[in-house]
Amino acid sequence: MYKDYSVEKLEELRKELTAEYEAYKAKGLHLDMSRGKPAPEQLDLTIDMLTHCLDGDYKSENGIDCRNYGVLDGIPEAKELMMSMLGVSENEIIVGGNSSLQLMYDTIARAMLLGVLGGDKPWSKNEKVKFLCPAPGYDRHFAICESIGIEMITVPYKADGPDMDMVEKLVSEDEEIKGIWCVPMYSNPTGITYSDEVVKRFANLSPKAKDFRIFWDNAYCIHHLTDTPDKLLNVLEEAKKNGKEDMIFMFTSTSKISFPGGGIACIGASAANINFIKSQMTYQTIGYDKLNQLRHAKFFKNADGLKAHMLKHRAIIGPKFDVVLNMLDKEIKPLGIADWHKPNGGYFVSFNGLEGTAKRIVALCKEAGVVLTDAGATYPYKNDPKDNNIRIAPTFPTVSELTTAMEIFCVSVKLASVEKLLAK
Amino acid sequence: MYKDYSVEKLEELRKELTAEYEAYKAKGLHLDMSRGKPAPEQLDLTIDMLTHCLDGDYKSENGIDCRNYGVLDGIPEAKELMMSMLGVSENEIIVGGNSSLQLMYDTIARAMLLGVLGGDKPWSKNEKVKFLCPAPGYDRHFAICESIGIEMITVPYKADGPDMDMVEKLVSEDEEIKGIWCVPMYSNPTGITYSDEVVKRFANLSPKAKDFRIFWDNAYCIHHLTDTPDKLLNVLEEAKKNGKEDMIFMFTSTSKISFPGGGIACIGASAANINFIKSQMTYQTIGYDKLNQLRHAKFFKNADGLKAHMLKHRAIIGPKFDVVLNMLDKEIKPLGIADWHKPNGGYFVSFNGLEGTAKRIVALCKEAGVVLTDAGATYPYKNDPKDNNIRIAPTFPTVSELTTAMEIFCVSVKLASVEKLLAK
């Protein structure tokens, strides 16, 4: 454990690590672990969808010509497919276009401009609009808030989800708090899944703002990495028990199932919310791309088809997570300078180093040709108060590239940690 | 000419027309001329795009894997294709998703929430926001304004475009006027194309609001119906001559070239506008569907490919326009109770009956099984002050269906006109 080392030993170690680091740097590598991006082999799994999937057949099961105008909320078979992902009913879903991020952005834009069901005015008519942001979290969620001028309040994570004492207290006291971002399963980046208790407390929030919404981004709902996957309680069903179902907006997509940017996305919500959203959305578009919805429905067929397909993804990316976790276990764990969570699914490993080392580690890696997500990106305003969280995205590089990248990562972690300990 | 008929003759005519009308009604038909919807035969023209178009090839010409994340503004070959439609350069375009309506709505939503280039605050921070609406115009343009609470001011049409004296006067006097809707070529529904003088006057507007924008929806830019198509001056190039290029937002799509709802759409604007829009749009989406962009680029290849393809559409829909125009010429013209414009392209025939008859004609048609666009729909707030404009959309029905529908339309026009003349 580094903390037991003498200054002399640390000084010596620094020299050794610097030499090791410089040797990697000299190789002039270019490796990217910055984004949760599927590898090309994963995209090959759905390649048939791009070719013969629609041969001579372009009608939905209810007879709609998917090549022509119409159908705001999605064709029945695409709804069926995505209902299985979110656990909602036919009248609780809108299947949209190629991006759940866009559905979330548009949902907030509509709330700002027009208001949500049960609100008495658009959010933007308030002097200030605030969101709770459990962190570390998804940088693009926070970026939406920042771009629209929504004030973000950071909420820390506990082992089983956001700090619910804090969430309950804040939403019950402050009417300007209109929403909270959640990635409830295999959370980006922590990898944890909200416990039943956390979900139940979400489903029973009593916000002061009656136009408050929970943005439940269930991006990784079927993205398991083990035979004993996490289980997430259905927040909409729980909320119904409390008569609070209108508080929930759920989202997911096939971006990491079929094609990122070429998949389909959806909103799940109470039937009343869905009707209200459709009444606003009908001015934005005549309908989303039904041909791509049909392609997906034909290719995956049903929930079992999706499930079987996700095993193929797991076979490709599981070994990559193993590389990351095994190397961290071997190289870093004995040194007592960091911790991380072994996720049962999702796309990330969230790494917590010594306080004040994250930026340095990312910089060292970058100099040696390994691009990581910017340190701080997982916090509102890119401000990680402890400067210790780094999001590792193992899926895109090959196993061999990843191994090299993790070697560089580990030596960078050690070097930055020794520097930190010596500076004390 | 009906106006020369005696009351007795009109009374007799009413009986005859009523009998004729009742005979059609008894047939129990169901015919739809309500929307500008391509016929199934037109959709068959691009059917190969749905199947083998991407066989084994999913990289853009600059090496991007179109199956994965990235590229906010479109792949180069899709840009190239759509640049030819709008007449803009590489840095003056964003290729988006499946809907130009959505790009327009989102552009207004961003202007409301965030503001446009050169504005000192979001539009929504003004007490009131107004748009000029040349009418008759596209109902979905007006619906966007209405849904967002933008006040609409109707501007009448002249033979060669909107009344520019009125446009110039209003925009120069009223800072709350932030935009104007234009369908400059084969206008929806009038079918006229703006004259060079009108385009030049648009390109040289001096609005009081420095964050004023012209929404130039060039939906029918290559949708010609004759060998001597209309020509439209390039408004962006004209505006550059006056240093006013930032005032223009252009839009178009392939909705009526490939597939409605399954096509690709774009925004054209000055490079400065495009950069500004991208800086806002990057929070809404990681990128639009590049696979569909690639499909379109591979299928149409280039501007010549598009041009050749549009001849195939013309071969299908040209005869339908002929049915409408020939029957109007034969049945209605001699009676002096209506006028219309023979369009050289686009999707509509705009019919002007006697004042106060449009609602009645549409109702009569509906009762006899022919669905037309609602009377008034082509005006802001659905309020046609003269109640005389009807939009005829001939493309979707077969020639035989259309012939029957037009027979019913003509008898309904005659009957409503006789009723009107008798009521005077």
Image (cartoon, coloured by chain):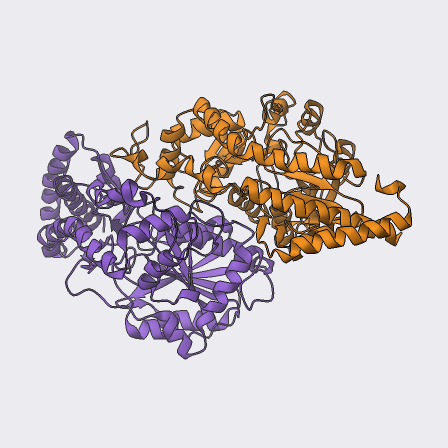
Chain colours: A orange, B purple
Judged left or right of residue A276, residue B38 is left
The answer, for residue A47, to whether it is visible in the render is yes
Judged left or right of residue B102, residue A332 is right
Task: Reply above or below: B173 against A140.
Answer: below
Q: Please name whichever residue, B27 or A317, is drawn nearer the observer in this view of the structure.
A: A317
Residue A342, position as x, y percentages in the image: 67, 31
Residue B175, position as x, y percentages in the image: 53, 68
Quarter of the rendering containing residue B269 = bottom left
Residue at image position (81%, 38%) is: A336
Q: Please name whichever residue, B397 or B412, is drawn nearer the observer in this view of the structure.
A: B397
Quarter of the rendering containing residue A23 = bottom right
Q: Please name whichever residue, A98 or A153, is drawn nearer the observer in this view of the structure.
A: A98
Residue at image position (54%, 33%) is: A273
Residue B377, position as x, y percentages in the image: 34, 49
The answer, for residue A190, to whether it is visible in the render is no
Task: Reply above or below: B337 against B193.
Answer: above
Pick the quarter of the image with the N terminus of chain B: bottom left
Residue at image position (42%, 34%) is: A45
Judged left or right of residue A47, residue B333 is left
